């Protein structure tokens, strides 16, 4: 799992270099969302992780379940970058306070939304604020070092594409 941790931290650094911290419409970047494309995950079917359940995704060569202790370590006090699989290509940054508070915003937005997060047994749960309902699920690591978030009894339709130490965006 040390390899996974290193991959995620390196990917987080690459996202910073690619411009994920920009907030204006003129922000550059070379990630898929900046080019108006849905994120692509190699070694997965062409339709991506979003059409797969956790069990199906774990059948793909090179994927592995991520233990909840690692998720707690990755998220607590850090900023994660999320992209939906398919659909609208957006990047969301979310800071996870140790207290359970969550602050997030869409990449180009100026306003920050406040929500909450927690670990419930073997599941990561988060409530992104007033506009959304709580989602609980688990994570699967892809061969590319991304984390697919799979909701309970549902699809893996979100990717964590990077994690930075601390509140890197001042959320």
Image (tube, rainbow, N blue to C red):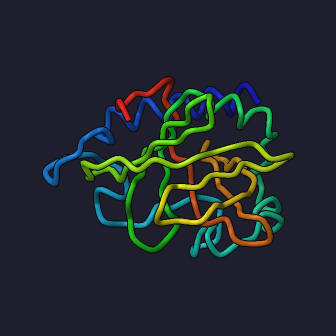
Q: Quadrant of the C terminus?
A: top left
Tell me: residue 153, above or below residue 116: below
| Of 145 and 72, the residue lying toward us | 72
Q: Residue shown at 58%/46% (left/top)?
A: 116
Measured as percent of width and height from the top left, residue 69 is found at 79, 33
- What is the residue that sits farthest to the left in this orientation? 26
Q: Residue shown at 63%/45% (left/top)?
A: 117
Measured as percent of width and height from the top left, residue 72 is found at 71, 33
1 sits left or right of 15 in the view:
right
| Of 43 and 81, the residue lying toward us | 81
- What is the residue that sits farthest to the front in this orientation? 130
Tell me: residue 133, above or below residue 29: below
Q: Residue shown at 62%/52% (left/top)?
A: 126
Measured as percent of width and height from the top left, residue 35 is found at 28, 60
Measured as percent of width and height from the top left, residue 137 is found at 74, 57
Q: Residue shown at 36%/53% (left/top)?
A: 106
């Amino acid at each position: 799992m040390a390899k996974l941790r290193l991959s995620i931290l390196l990917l987080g650094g690459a996202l910073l270099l690619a411009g994920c911290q920009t907030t204006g419409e003129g922000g550059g970047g070379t990630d898929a969302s900046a080019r108006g494309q849905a994120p692509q995950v190699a070694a997965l079917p062409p339709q991506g992780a979003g059409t797969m359940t956790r069990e199906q995704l774990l059948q793909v060569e090179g994927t592995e379940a991520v233990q909840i202790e690692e998720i707690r370590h990755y998220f607590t006090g850090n900023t994660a970058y999320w992209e939906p699989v398919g659909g609208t290509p957006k990047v969301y940054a979310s800071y996870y306070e140790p207290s359970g508070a969550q602050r997030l915003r869409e990449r180009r937005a100026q306003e920050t939304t406040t929500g909450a997060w927690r670990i419930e047994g073997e599941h990561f749960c988060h409530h992104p604020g007033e506009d959304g309902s709580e989602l609980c699920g688990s994570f699967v690591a892809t061969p590319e070092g991304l984390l697919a978030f799979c909701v309970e009894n549902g699809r893996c339709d979100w990717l964590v594409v990077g994690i930075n130490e601390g509140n890197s965006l001042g959320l």
